[in-house]
Image (tube, rainbow, N blue to C red):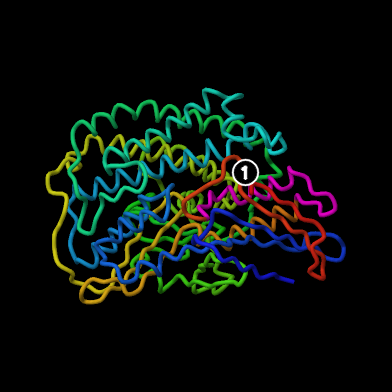
Amino acid sequence: MAERILINTVTRVEGHAKVSIYVDDAGEVSSAQFHVVEFRGFEKFVEGRPFHEMPGLMSRICGICPVSHVLASSKAGDRLLGVEVPPAAVKQRRLVNLAQILQSHALSFFHLSSPDLLLGFDSDPARRNIFGLIDCEADFARRGIRVRKFGQRIIELVGGRKIHPSWSTPGGVQTRMGAEARDEIAAGVPEALESVKLALDRLKSVLDSFPVEIEHLGNFPSLFLGMVSPRGEVEFYDGVIRIGDAEGNIVADGLDPLRYYTYLGEASEEWSYMKFPFYKPLGYPGGMYRVGPLARLNVAASTGTPLADRELREFKQRSRGAVCQSFHYHLARLIEMLHCVERIEELMVDRELMGKRVRARAGQNQNEGVGACEAPRGTLFHHYVVDDDGVMQKVNLLIATGQNNLAINRAVTQAAQRFVRPEAIQEGMLNRVEAAIRCFDPCLSCSTHALGQMPLEIDVRNSRGEVVNRYRRGR
């Protein structure tokens, strides 16, 4: 019997989560649900505000990936103005987006996931975190911290602050980038490149140690959705939508992200505040799809940079069709980090980046605008409707973690059925259920992550819906 969770709190998607596991009369796990029990309401409380304020307001949605929301919001504003953004501003936006993906992926891999991978899923939970990793793998942990610092420093140099920058605005950006910032960024590339390559080699060296986890922490067929360039390359800032299936076939290509609502639907369930997006032609829930690093690499023909392309070719050899094991989000994340550093290095010698004209100025020319880009966790859409005075009337946000919601629930069920013994719950079992969620690097409150372990509850219920065992952690 499904339960309904009623929480009178703030926050929109997650910072806290709950997993309910249901057991049949035979004592076996029959299903599980991943509950997001917080509500933030950004889509409602920005109504009545001028659309020029939206990038600054929307950057507050997330402290980990604020740049994504700034850019999607700015691009929606570009549409409302009906202008072409100057090349220097586009290059700035691209640079900061690459830096954000780099630092966010570094946080996910080095801080949140590598303790499981290098210390063990069943290791002491008091040490299975970044501090335990520092004790055992000091250089590895230090490199992860410095890679993230490099990404954050780029955001600060270009965007004015590490967290919640709002330098990007409808029509472009507010400030021109200086030569000192360019030179500092260029100087940091070699170390970042070396650290990411070392992390890739280290992850690939331990992957064979986790055959059961690879098989059961979210391994199932689904669709995959991501942006690609006209040449089919990975594209984080401004591409078209491509959708592929589990066999590696392209299901749909060249889809306009500005018309996302024609092919993506949004369902809701009483037991979660997070939306359940789906691919409309296959309906709900059959239209389940995944976004983010795993999906982007599955649908792209190449990355467009030499080192990352070499890794991508090896990545695609892991399966005859698409790589469907959610465990390999970790590997895909590192390949994207390598690609980001390569692209950042390219931009440092791009003359357009230092251009003087960084903003197109115009009055409002449209009443509806959509902005889309790739966030660290997947494709992000901001959809604004304004009146003739430019005042927000309606907002819809389709956030990457929400688009993974159906897949996360499938992964949680699969992990619970394989690892959880209802009669004797152990911490390692819980950690593997949690790890299934962590593969997706969900930004559930779209702003915070727990240190070492996600706040989580597991309820084990019998066929009559009665709680027979409960395990809480992280509160």
Query: Is residue 469 depicted above or below 213 in this figure?
Result: below
Q: Please identify the quarter of the rendering in which residue 155 is found.
A: top left
Task: Using a 10 Å C-alpha cutoff, classify the residue at mark 1 as few (fewer than 14 neighbours), some (14 to 19) or many (20 or more).
Answer: some
Please provide percent x and percent y for residue 468: 82, 60
Which quarter of the image is occupied by the N terminus?
Answer: bottom right
Establish if 440 lies above or below 222: above
Above or below: residue 368 compared with residue 178: below
**93 or 318: nearer the viewer:** 93
Give the image location of residue 475, x and y in percent.
Answer: 64, 49
Task: Evaluate whether residue 27 shows in this view.
Answer: yes
**Of the residues shown, which amino acid type is indicated by label 1?**
Gln
Residue 230 visible in this rendered orientation of the protein: no
* Residue linked to disc 1: 453
Residue range highlighted in magenta:
419-444
Q: Where residue 472 sits in the image (x, y, percent)? A: 71, 51
Q: Tell me which residue sits at (64%, 56%) in the image.
A: 411
Query: Which of the two residues, 118 or 173, is positioned nearer the viewer here?
Result: 173
Instruction: Check if residue 441 falls in the magenta segment.
Output: yes
Q: Which residue is at a point 18% across and 59% down the rendered structure image?
A: 84
Magenta residue check for 457: no
The quadrant where residue 113 appears:
top right
Q: Position of residue 133 (x, y in %)?
A: 59, 29
Residue at the farthest right position:
26
Image check: 338 left or right of 249?
A: left
